[in-house]
Image (tube, rainbow, N blue to C red):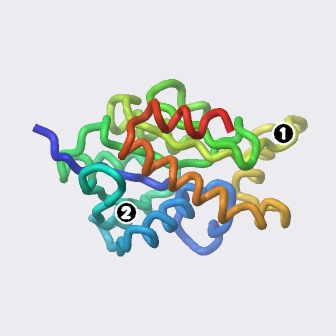
Amino acid sequence: MSSDFWLIAGLGNPGSRYEGTRHNMGFMCADILAERWNVSLSDHKGLALLGKGIMRLSGAPLKFFLTKPLTFMNDSGNAVASICSYYDIAPEHVIAIHDDMDLEFGRIKVKAGGSAGGHNGIKSIDRSLGTNAYSRVRLGVGHAARQGDAHAKTVNWVLGGFSSSQKSQLCDFLSDGADAVETIMNEGLGQAQEKFNGR
């Protein structure tokens, strides 16, 4: 029998050179959740920063782990699968928070399953868990201009920073992302989709 813990995984790249970049939206959102629920993160097998918390919203208290993988984005699944295996967490109780170039900045889409949409962190989790039946909170970062060397442009874009107008909205945007995570856990995926996907 699986444990009743949830696992919230904010995706990003470790190290100061990646701080504040578009690809680290998941890390930033995880930081907000850590602050809200007083979770302190420490090392898990060298693969991730991991902390434990209890979320008290409208229903029964919800126990959860919060993680920021240290494996770099492309191997995020190694950390997520290790934690799921160690604590016996079912994929249906996993929520991945990540940047998404297919959504304009400020847009949030909540989903479970479906395509990885070219996101290497999600591809890695799909591979490592052997399923895509987990929830995702997709935080829009917009897309680089689709011209010239598309791959180089994409890499430079996701590892780049935010414009000044985006920076002024970032805190509210990340708070909305944290709200979406809480809604999935507390009210279910359908309610979260209704609240956030149409914004």
**Residue 124 in view in this figure:** yes
Q: Where is mark 2, residue-wise?
A: 48
Which image quarter: residue 89?
top left
- Judging depth in this view, the residue of 45 and 116 nearest the camera is 116
Mark 2 Cα-neighbour bin, 10 Å: few <14, some 14–19, many ≥20: many
Lower position in the chain sequence, tag 1 or tag 2: 2
Q: Residue at x 25, y 38 (%)?
A: 90
Direction from residue 106 to residue 77 in the image, left or right: left
Q: Residue at x 56, y 63 (%)?
A: 28
Q: Where is mark 1, residue-wise?
A: 149
**Residue 79 in view in this figure:** no
Direction from residue 170 to residue 59 in the image, left or right: left
- Judging depth in this view, the residue of 148 and 122 nearest the camera is 122
Can you say whether 148 is above or below 68 in the image? above
Direction from residue 154 to residue 137 in the image, left or right: left
Can you say whether 70 is above or below 112 in the image? below
Q: Secondary structure at mark 2?
A: strand
